[in-house]
Amino acid sequence: MAHLAPNYAPLDVTLTQGGGAWLTDIHGNRYLDCLASYSAVNFGHGHPALIAAAHEQLDSLTLVSRAFDHDLLAPFADALTALTGTEMMLPMNTGAEAVETAIKAARRWAYLSKGVPDGQAEIIVAEGAFHGRTTTIISFSTDPDARDHYGPYTPGFVTVPYDDPDAVAAAITPRTAAILVEPIQGEGGVIIPSVDYLPRLRALTDANNVLLILDEVQSGLGRTGYTLDQQRVGVAADLTTLGKALGGGIMPVSAVVGRADVLGLLTPGTHGSTFGGNPLACRIGIAVVQLLKTGEFQEHARALEAPLGERLDKLRERQLIADYRRVGAWAGIDVAPSLGLSGKEVCVRLRDRGVLAKDTHGSTIRLAPPLVISEAELHEALDALEDALE
């Protein structure tokens, strides 16, 4: 791969085919997918309803830009806002673009509605967060790999510890436009905050006329057993960013959903995207919404939580793992230091046992299988994990 920029260091496996929760490499070896492309493939590889929708749309219309309307844009907006219980949707392509859009919308609202002096708006963010890799977003990243040597950095962000509402309260000023956090820090190792974290942030934003922005690009659309993870703790954000699974694993599709009085300030010429809301994306997005409307994927994710936890409890009792965090069909697993293994070394061992997973932050393994995985297949993956750790 001499002509490919070396910005990734993937496991030594070259994949060529996928179906459901399984992948096949160029040598014909099969693997149980326990990453689901960071939750972008929540509905499995090649879900027939999504593939059929994409195929049908490919034969009619794929792109007109936002210079013209098409017959699927309004239905997509209607479907996604109904699913999420929100008022308005703005379509984009990638998760990072959705976060950038939410940042712009929050700043514009601060200037035009709240009365913050132009150019002085601040957004409170959390340490350990991952919201994407654009210049603005990495400006408030605390990960040196993502941030170093990309300055000068975009100002206007105040960083506080994650899962610390008191620190947020102390950081709020009359210039504060929004609080932007992940309900669960996925890239950070599936870090699940205290159950009162988001409710306390909601109370703070309500009391101070500040927007609550929740980045659900990874946690949303069924991953944790709910359409949006914020529903798990009874919170409704002012703006929510969605991506990854919204494209069904077929193409990049993202969106910001939330309050009409905020998103409605993005008037013609103030924000846009050539590909955002294209007909193919809308058709796939509508099909994704239809899959989630039944609640079956959310219910299955909740059903997998108990057996996943029981198996990980046993690994912890045997001191093969130091600790773990899990919700729905999502887990961050810390390898026991006594084993002397990095997370990547364990993932290599898993690959050799027919399971694909991804490490993060040195000794943590992330499991995020497609939500079509059966309980038997989940146990198969955990058997492989146990064997790899032994």
Image (tube, rainbow, N blue to C red):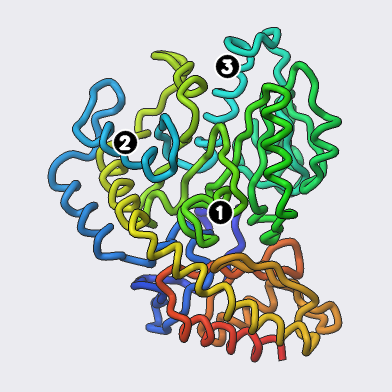
Where is residue 39 drawn, in percent x and y? 50, 59
Mark 2–mark 1 distance (CA, rounded to whole Å): 22 Å
Tag 2's secondary structure?
A: helix
Tag 1's secondary structure?
A: loop
Q: Which residue is mark 1?
A: 219
The amino acid type of the residue labelled 1 equals Ser
Q: Is residue 254 above or below residue 20?
A: above
- Residue 387 occupies which quadrant of the picture? bottom right
- Residue at (79%, 41%) from the top-left corner? 165
- Residue 390 occupies which quadrant of the picture? bottom right
Q: Which residue is mark 2?
A: 78
Mark 3–mark 2 distance (CA, rounded to whole Å): 24 Å
- Mark 3 or mark 2, earlier in chain: 2
Q: Is residue 258 left or right of residue 124?
A: left
Q: Is residue 125 left or right of residue 351?
A: right
- Mark 3 or mark 1, earlier in chain: 3
Q: Which mark is residue 108?
A: 3
Residue most extreme to the left: 60
Q: Is residue 213 above or below residue 235?
A: above
Mark 3–mark 1 distance (CA, rounded to whole Å): 26 Å
The amino acid type of the residue labelled 3 equals Arg
10 Å crowding of disc 2: few (<14), some (14-19), many (20+): some
Where is residue 372 drawn, in percent x and y? 40, 71
- Residue 169 occupies which quadrant of the picture? top right
